[in-house]
Amino acid sequence: MKYKKYFRKTSLKQPDDASFFLSLIKEKKPKFFLEIGVFNGVKSRNVCELLNSIHKGNFQYIGIDLFEVNDENKYEVIPNTRFLNPFKNFYFRYIKKQNPYSLKAVEELLKKFKKNVHLIKGNSNKILKQIDLSKINFAFLDGGHDYLTVKKDLFYLNEILETGGTILCDDYNLSNAPGVKKAIDEIVREKKLKCEFYCNYRFAKLEKK
């Protein structure tokens, strides 16, 4: 399956990274998918397209994101949301009249799968304590990059591993966010997890041994 851009920027800029991401999901075939760090929904749309094809519409996608820069996340590593292409800036600002990184914009991008998608706006450290993770088969962690944020997210997501699920962590080797690597390494040691790296250590895949 080819990874599509949907006229928006994506964090999976390298074809090999995008190909690996979709191939792993295709291999695992999760029916209940959780993404922390939705960004502008491009990865989410690709995931939904793939899961819809695999499960003939019988899947669930949950996405958690702050969806805006505010006092709660101003110290985080925030992806660059400006388009280099001036036409795209013009399109979203004056034609769509929409912030492509807003909750409303992501809902619109995923409206094809409205019955399958549940987007939650808020801090993942708080939300993960409140939702039922028992059915989640696969989680993609690409939210807050602060050490404590990642460590807490992984602490709650460990429930997924206990039931045979998979966690794929993004930006393991990101130089300007060393807290990601530190948190992953610690949780792997503490929980005695199986950890494999892909795409030049960009991704860390966590599973139970």
Image (cartoon, rainbow, N blue to C red):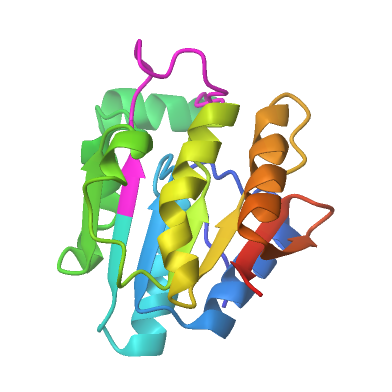
Q: On the rendered structure, is 186 left or right of 107?
A: right
Q: Give the range drawn in magenta.
A: 63-85
Q: Position of residue 125 (x, y in %)?
A: 37, 36
Q: Where is 85 relative to 69, above or below?
A: below
Q: Position of residue 126 (x, y in %)?
A: 29, 35
Q: Residue drawn 67% across and 54% down?
A: 188
Q: Where is 97 relative to 140, above or below?
A: above
Q: On the rendered structure, is 192 left or right of 37?
A: right
Residue 85 visible in the displayed image: no
Q: Which of 96 and 141 is in front in this view?
A: 141
Within the image, what quadrant is residue 209 found in? bottom right
What's the magenta bit mostly, secondary-structure-wise?
A: loop
Q: Quadrant of the N terminus?
A: bottom right
Can residue 95 be found in the magenta stretch? no
Q: On the rendered structure, is 164 left or right of 97?
A: right
Q: Residue drawn 50% across and 68% down?
A: 161
Residue lying furthest right in this view? Answer: 200
Within the image, what quadrant is residue 98 found in? top left
Residue 96 visible in the displayed image: yes
Q: Where is residue 68 in the image (x, y as percent from the top left)?
A: 34, 24
